[in-house]
Amino acid sequence: MINKSELVSGLRGGLVVSCQAYPGEPLREPEIMSRMAQAAVIGGAVAIRAQGLDDIKLIHQNVTVPQIGLWKVGVDGVFITPTLEHALAVIRAGAEIVAIDGTRRKRPDGLTVRQTIEAIHDQTDALVMADVGDLDDALASERAGADLVSSTLAGYTTSRPRTEGPDLELLAQLTANLRLPVFAEGRIRTPEHARVCLEAGAHAVVVGTAITHPTTITRWFTDALTR
Ligand SMILES: CC(=O)N[C@H](C=O)[C@@H](O)[C@H](O)[C@H](O)COP(=O)(O)O
């Protein structure tokens, strides 16, 4: 049985490391993502964010920190854990927190965010993280019963520009207007960015690419050399 408030307070002020590789990439193997997660925990990660049932299952077996699980379907529209069935499968695979699309867009199974969250809460003891793209998404997700909100989709929907680093303007809006814990996520590239997000009131900070996506990190360096 998950103690929800203990779980949430255990993440406060911490770093969540997102361990994801994308279709067709050389590191897209559950064993590799599981090892990435173990390495992140040694470095002090308080939780792991992971995509796909096989990765979530293996990471669940190999790390002791909580896991935020998601299932991506496609790359645009509602693609982060788009339906209730995807969410339940992610939880069955071992995620204590399920990240779902928390935007106000139409979902492929026709359920609302509220119906999705209610069903998850009725059927499981997992927490629901709403991945949002703007303040109105976040307010709607809070009203719909989400346990946590993350700025994951800032810059990936039509409502906000894709900022170079984290969308600090949105983060300020979220922390000022929500009662729920707000996770800062998306384009946090440096330890300084992470610090600034916490100082802006984020409950915790989620970093993916800058820690676990070596192809992109390599590109940052090679681009700098050819400028
Ligand atoms: C928009 C989207 O699909 N975000 C995904 C959500 O799980 C991941 O691809 C990101 O890596 C994650 O959000 C962390 O962000 P960043 O990699 O920028 O630190």
Image: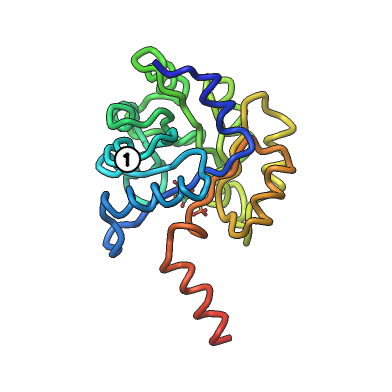
Dividing the picture into quarters, in which one does residue 87 lie?
A: top left
In the rendered image, the vertical position of residue 190 relative to residue 98, given as above or below: below
Could you tell me which residue is drawn at 62 percent across and 62 percent down? 164
The yes-or-no answer for disc 1 within 8 Å of ligand 1 is no
The residue at the far front in this view is 42
Mark 1 Cα-neighbour bin, 10 Å: few <14, some 14–19, many ≥20? some
Could you tell me which residue is drawn at 62 percent across and 29 percent down? 181
The quarter of the rendered structure image containing the N terminus is top left
Q: Amino acid at mark 1?
A: Asn
Dividing the picture into quarters, in which one does residue 177 lie?
A: top right
Q: Nearer the viewer, residue 107 or 71?
A: 71
Q: Find residue 192 and report its horizontal and vertical position in percent.
A: 68, 56
Q: Nearer the viewer, residue 178 or 13?
A: 13
Could you tell me which residue is drawn at 50 percent across and 50 percent down? 43
Could you tell me which residue is drawn at 59 percent across and 40 percent down? 14
Residue designated by label 1: 62
